[in-house]
Image (cartoon, rainbow, N blue to C red):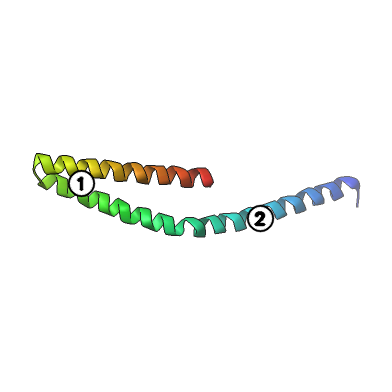
Amino acid sequence: MNDDTSTAEKIIAKLETERDELRVQMHLAKEEFQDEWEELERKWEKMQHKLAAARDETRESSTNIGTAAKLLAEEIRAAYQRIRKTL
């Protein structure tokens, strides 16, 4: 075996190790955020419901619901950004 082959094999082995480590980290990240994602999905559904209700309510009620929905949307957006940064 020449030095070039040995060097290539070492590089490949190191890449395999890095790949395996990243695969584990991705799996753990998925599990870590699963609960948070599910909570965000519940909030998303709640926001969608509130927006639908706002369309059926009077202007005053719609304004209150719209404000609450906006706050909820901002909270969901911030959580999405937090997840994106972590991944």
At a point 47% along the width and 55% down the height, the residue shown is: 33
Q: Is residue 1 left or right of residue 71?
A: right
Question: What is the secondary structure assignment of the residue under circle 1?
Answer: helix
Expressed as whole percent of the image width and height from the top left, the position of residue 18 reads 69, 51
> Of label 2 and label 1, which has the lower sequence position?
2
- Res 67 label: none
Residue placed under numbered mark 1 in the picture: 51
Q: Residues within 10 Å of mark 2 (few under 14, many from 20)?
A: few
At a point 48% along the width and 44% down the height, the residue shown is: 84
Image quadrant assignment for residue 25: bottom right
User: CA–CA distance between discs 2 and 1?
Assistant: 43 Å
Question: What is the secondary structure assignment of the residue under circle 2?
Answer: helix
Expressed as whole percent of the image width and height from the top left, the position of residue 21 reads 66, 55
At a point 86% along the width and 50% down the height, the residue shown is: 6
| Residue 52 to residue 32: above or below | above
Q: Are marks 2 and 1 in contact (CB under 8 Å)?
A: no
- Res 21 label: 2
As drawn, the residue found furthest toward the right would be: 2
Give 23 or 67, whichever is nearer the viewer.
67
Expressed as whole percent of the image width and height from the top left, the position of residue 5 reads 85, 49
Expressed as whole percent of the image width and height from the top left, the position of residue 56 reads 10, 47
Residue type, numbered disc 2: Glu
At a point 37% along the width and 56% down the height, the residue shown is: 39
